[in-house]
Amino acid sequence: MTFYSRIAGTGSYLPAKVLSNQDLEGSVETSDEWIFSRTGIRQRHIAADNEFASDLALKASQRALEAAGVAATDLSLIIVATTTPDMVFPSTACILQAKLGAKLGGLNCPAFDVQAVCSGFVYALTTADNFMRSGQYQNILVVGAEVYSRILDWEDRTTCVLFGDGAGAVVLKRSDAPGILSAHLHADGSHAHILSVPGSVNGGKISGRPLLQMEGNAVFKFAVRVLGEVAEEALAANHMDKSQIDWLIPHQANIRIIQATAKKLGMPMEKVIATVDRHANTSAASIPLALDTAVRDGRIRAGQHVLMEGVGGGFTWGAVLVRM
Ligand code: ACO
């Protein structure tokens, strides 16, 4: 028997505090006009001091579980994609499991984190799909949750204007028909220097500089190239033409990257889900946040084909093609 994964429910959560481009004009030398014209971003959400990735993940997960009609106690696996975990360990997934109370009939469901930066959700979804195909699991919770506000240099205008906090989640149910049609992952560690958070814990002290640094132009070019390539790879693997894709959900980093990717693929922007104006770049949370937005506003419907693709630090990149 062949087993597949079907997305049975989606959910998302954004912290209450909204930081607009105008608000940033007061703290760094920038302008709403510069930020919007270069990135398409108008605002971002910022977690409260006492809110951690697991708190954002919890709210997004509860909404996804409710939409899927699955109880937390019926989860057989939890995977959280995050680059901004609550702590070094336990994993954010384990902390989330405790907050959800997701214990399975005396056995505790496994839980672990995936760290692939802005491709984290695509990596986590792919991992979950492979577990599902093994036939060992029934209901899998996959979450992207980030608090990038904690790893930004708020005095560096070239990076602090680009990111935000948030979480998105999906519940996968085992199905006898796909669901997830195919997944394609890649990495190239030789570009680490153009996008990184070069800090670590060393003997109880922080060594290095645990704040995001980036060569924006180099990231831009790399992102446009690989997002185009991996989308073509997913289409070819399924013998599909781009006209058969109902919705493209690219990682939400910059509207110009999104537009350039859509143009390369020959897809009209009407078929592209873009939330970067309201959410900014929420890294591993950006794709599930955009997915949930478009599911809840009725654009994405059952039976449609959705191509999700991400690129991020590492470098990592990948795509997942789904029939909803
Ligand atoms: N406000 C005003 N001016 C600014 C700001 C700002 N926030 N940031 C930079 N500038 C200035 C620069 O100092 C520079 O000034 P100069 O000409 O006097 O030296 C000028 O604006 C142009 O800077 P560039 O870096 O050339 O601007 P560019 O048009 O390339 O846009 C940007 C920069 C938005 C970062 C772009 O390169 C980009 O989006 N890159 C992709 C990076 C990205 O999205 N990363 C997210 C993480 S990775 C991922 O998710 C894929």
Image (cartoon, rainbow, N blue to C red):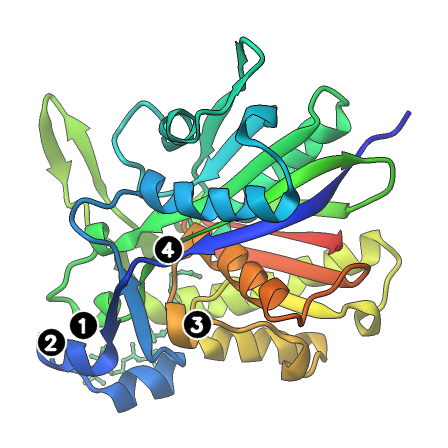
Sequence-first tag of 2 and 3: 2
Please name which of the two marks, 2 or 3, marks the residue nearer to the observer: 3
Give the answer, above or below, for where 239 lies relative to 177: below
Q: What residue is drawn where x is 9% and y is 23%? A: 204
Alpha carbon distance from label 3 to label 4: 12 Å
In contact (CB < 8 Å): disc 1 and disc 2? yes
The amino acid at mark 2 is Val
The CA distance from mark 4 to mark 2 is 23 Å
Indicate the secondary structure of the residue bearing disc 4: strand
Callout 3 touching callout 4 (CB < 8 Å): no
User: Which SS class for mark 2?
Assistant: loop
Task: For ligand 1, tell me if the residue under mark 4 lies within 8 Å.
Answer: no
Labelled disc at residue 166: 4
Q: In the displayed structure, does residue 38 sit left or right of residue 297?
A: left
Circle 3 is placed at which residue position?
A: 276
Q: Are marks 1 and 3 in contact (CB under 8 Å)?
A: no
Q: Amino acid at mark 1?
A: Arg
User: Which of the 4 image quarters holds residue 231?
Assistant: bottom right
Residue at numbered disc 2: 28
Mark 1 and ligand 1: say if the CB distance to the nearest ligand atom is below 8 Å: yes
Q: Is residue 189 above or below residue 158?
A: above
**Is residue 312 visible from the viewing direction of this image?**
no
Residue at 66% over, 62% down: 229
Q: Nearer the viewer, mark 3 or mark 4?
A: 4
Under 8 Å from ligand 1: the CB of mark 3?
no
Image quarter for ligand 1 equals: bottom left
Do residues under tags 4 and 2 come within 8 Å of each other at their CB atoms? no
Q: CA distance from mark 4 to mark 1?
A: 21 Å
Q: Are circles 2 and 3 on residues that touch, CB within 8 Å?
A: no
